[in-house]
Image: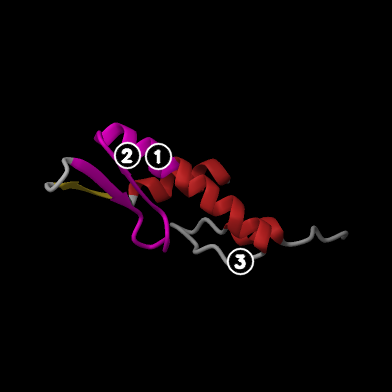
Amino acid sequence: MLASYIDTAMELAIYELIEDDGTYWGEIPTLQGVWANHSTLEECRQELREALSDWIALRLKLGLQIPVVAGIDLNQLTQPLSST
């Protein structure tokens, strides 16, 4: 579920070449605070994936809501299992 969330969220990423310094900026607009900046597009993508992973881990640890992406709801990972 976690890998699917990350892959799906990465498909929503947008990238921009910053003309002033020639670096690439990447972000996932639906996930506030998930962004990266690097000298090449591929390194920007890798950095963005790492930022997303860290962002998810922090939100899970702090018990903060994680936006549902394409029907994938990571918030249920923090719910206790029912003993039925």
Q: Residue 23, how many percent across, how many down?
A: 22, 41
Residue type at mark 1 is Glu
Question: Would you name the residue on which mark 2 appears?
Answer: 44
Q: Quadrant of the C terminus?
A: bottom right
Q: Residue at x 79, y 60 (%)?
A: 80
Q: Residue 49, how many percent across, how many down?
A: 43, 42
Q: Residue at x 42, y 63 (%)?
A: 32
Compared across the picture, whether 62 is left or right of 3 comes to right
* Disc 2 to disc 1, C-alpha distance: 5 Å
**Helix, strand or loop status at disc 2:** helix
**Mark 1 crowd level (few <14, some 14–19, many ≥20, 10 Å Cα):** some
**Helix, strand or loop status at disc 3:** loop
Question: Would you name the residue on which mark 3 appears?
Answer: 64
Question: For this rendering, which residue is in front, 22 or 9?
Answer: 22
Question: Would you name the residue on which mark 1 appears?
Answer: 47
Compared across the picture, whether 68 is left or right of 62 comes to left
Q: Which residues are magenta?
A: 23-49
The outermost residue toward the left is 19
Task: Find out whether residue 27 is within the magenta segment.
Answer: yes
Asked if disc 2 and disc 1 are in contact, CB closer than 8 Å, the reply is yes
Residue type at mark 2 is Cys
